[in-house]
Structures are given as structure tokens and as C-alpha cells.
Image: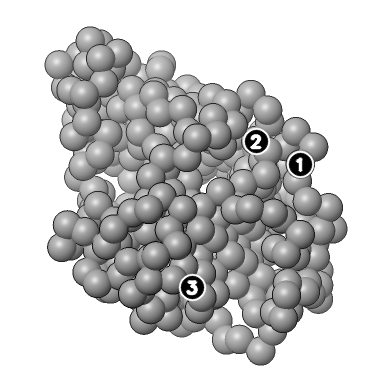
Amino acid sequence: MPFAKSLARLGGVLSLAVAAQAGNTTYTIQDSYDASNFFDSFDFFNGADPTSGFVQYVDAATANSSGLAGYANNGIYLGVDYQTANPSAGRASVRLTSKNAYTHGLIIADIAHQPAPACGSWPAFWTFGPSWPHSGEIDIIEGVNLQTNSTITLHTAPGCSFSQDSFASGDCGSPGDGTQGCGASTQDTRNFGAGFNEIGGGVYALQWTSDAIKIFFFPRTGTIPADIEAGSPNPNNWGKPTASFSGGSCNIDANFMNHNIVFDTTFCGQWAGKVWGDDPVCSAKASTCQEYVGSNPADFQDTYWLINYVKVFSEAGSKRGIAKRFHA
């Protein structure tokens, strides 16, 4: 389906013959998603929100005709409905899942804009495997309401903990079903929401090996590594990651596999709605999260993703995980 937003698609497909050396691991670009192929490579999920949000995820045709998904500024635009008051089925939004799934490698996303902080919103950029939580989930960017910095979290079945966890967290399968996970909020206000958008965004990278899961963030203010911009990423050159998970009792290969990539924005639900009463600013606006999100559509005009690209690099000689569709 041809999508239209503001500008035409980018011309050409990026080369798939680039390799990068990281320690003893050579990374070769496997998939590149940009405005030339993004909507051919991701599926629109339009089922009930698994996190019980006040949201109506729409299909590709609806997203296209209503302007909730398309192209802008040579990037991929993923927005929400900011015009309809009191939608009975929840505020319309999009949730896109990559058709391909991955185990190990580098996932690098250049993002120009994240959904701006707004009471009731819950945007996320994440990966997950089949039979949740037994194949794991990695939340790369996530936050709710007026949060000013990103939360990075891993979710697994019980029995996975890391001794060298950046956040000194416990079992990633807590509290027994994986819903809480392990991780915490970061401290850099440039990596999420308003602070991220003010500097024109930046680049996130997930490095996933048998030994560690690492998340890196590079703001667009002159600190994006030259090897990433050259298409030959080398994590050895990147310094300390924003978050790192290694050591301990967790067998990464047994708990994380065949992950699809997801971008979504939901509302309220099991996080933004659950903590509504704990936020003095948001709770003063309405008695419930759903009431506020339904009654204030204009507050979500800046609740959109603008993605320049997502690139996936695989370890030399590795095989792509089996692609699986998401089923709620």
C-alpha cells in the first residue's frame, strides 16, 4: 500500500554489503528500514492492546487514510489521533511490528522525534520474542505521562538475573510473570521526550550477544560515532553504554530469542493508567487517565514518532531468527 504524509519516499535502498568489526565479532548489515521500505517491512497490529490501554490500534489502510502513519521530512511518521474527542473505543494509534525477527546482533535506530510527554501517553520502542515472556523482551525506549528520561527494562520468565546490571536490579522475571522485569529510568533527560526532541533526536543502539545486552544512546549534538554514520558500526569505539546487563544467573541465549522490533504509542493501561494517581500534575487534570485522554485530543498533536531509519547488523556467520507474527 503506498503511504503518503508530507514528502515522497527516499530514493534507493541502502547497500547491504557493509561489515563492521567489534572486538572479535564482525557485524554485517542484514536489514535496513527507511522511508523506501518501512511499511513493506512492518505489520500493523490492530488487535486489543495487550497492556489494557485506552487505545484503538488501527490497520494499515486506516492509518494511511487518516494520516496516522506516513512519511514526513524524509522519515517515517507514526502518530495518534489528536482531533477526536471522547472516542468510545480508545484514542486511535498505531503499533508496528517488524516482519523479520532477530537473535543477537546490533539494532541501530536514528530517530528525529519521539512522542512528546503528555499525561496518559505511553510510547515505546522495544523488541520481543514469541511465547512472552519466555523468549524475552527488551525495552529500549519507554516512558509514561510527563516522564523526562527513558526507562530501559528487560522482561523474561522467572530465574534470570544479572550480576553486572547497570541498575542493580533483581530477577527480570519479577514478580513471577515478567511484568515488572529488571531495569530502571536513566538519568539523561536528552534521551527521552522533550529533551530528546529539543536537540533533534539522536541514535539508539542495542548490542545483543550471548554474554551481554547493552543499550547505547547518542544525542544528535555532535556525539554520534563516526562509524555509525559511515555505516560500519564498531561498539568497541562507543564508550560506556547507557545500560548493560551481563553476568549472574541469566542465560541470555535461553531467555532472549527471535525478537521482532516494535514501535507503538498506547494510552493509560497497566503503566500510565496505574500510576495516574501518583502524578500530582496529571491527576489534577482529571480523576482518571482515560477521562483525560478522551477529553483532550489536542494535547496529543506532538505524540508521534519520526524515524529516519532502523538498521539491523548481524554477527558474521549467524542466522536470522525465525520471523514470527505477533498474536495478542
Question: Of the residues shown, which amino acid type is indicated by label 1?
Answer: Thr
Residue 303 in the image: state x and y as whole percent: 46, 29
Task: Report the side of 65 relative to 240 (left or right).
Answer: left
Q: How many callouts does the rendering have?
A: 3
Q: SS for tag 3?
A: loop
Task: Report the side of 232 relative to 48 (left or right).
Answer: right
* Vertical order, 95 against 132 (above or below): above
Which residue sits at x=55%, y=55%? 215
- To which residue does mark 2 refer? 201
Question: Of the residues shown, which amino acid type is indicated by label 3?
Answer: Ala
Q: Foreground mark, 3 or 2?
A: 2
* Vertical order, 253 against 68 (above or below): below
- To which residue does mark 1 refer? 223
Of pointers 3 and 2, the one earlier in the residue sequence: 3
Dividing the picture into quadrants, the one containing residue 130 is: bottom left
Q: Foreground mark, 1 or 2?
A: 1
Task: Report the side of 146 relative to 237 (left or right).
Answer: left
Q: What is the distance, in whole Å, between disc 1 and disc 2 at their CAs? A: 12 Å
List the single residue furthest toward the bottom: 317
Neighbourhood count class around disc 2 (C-alpha, 10 Å): few under 14, some 14–19, many 20 upward: many
Question: Of the residues shown, which amino acid type is indicated by label 2?
Answer: Gly
Residue 112 in the image: state x and y as whole percent: 65, 37
Of pointers 1 and 3, the one earlier in the residue sequence: 3
- To which residue does mark 3 refer? 101
Q: Foreground mark, 1 or 3?
A: 1
Residue 319 in the image: state x and y as whole percent: 57, 86
Dividing the picture into quadrants, the one containing residue 53 is: top left
Q: Which quadrant of the figure contains the C terminus?
A: bottom left
Q: SS for tag 2?
A: loop
* Vertical order, 65 against 46 (above or below): above
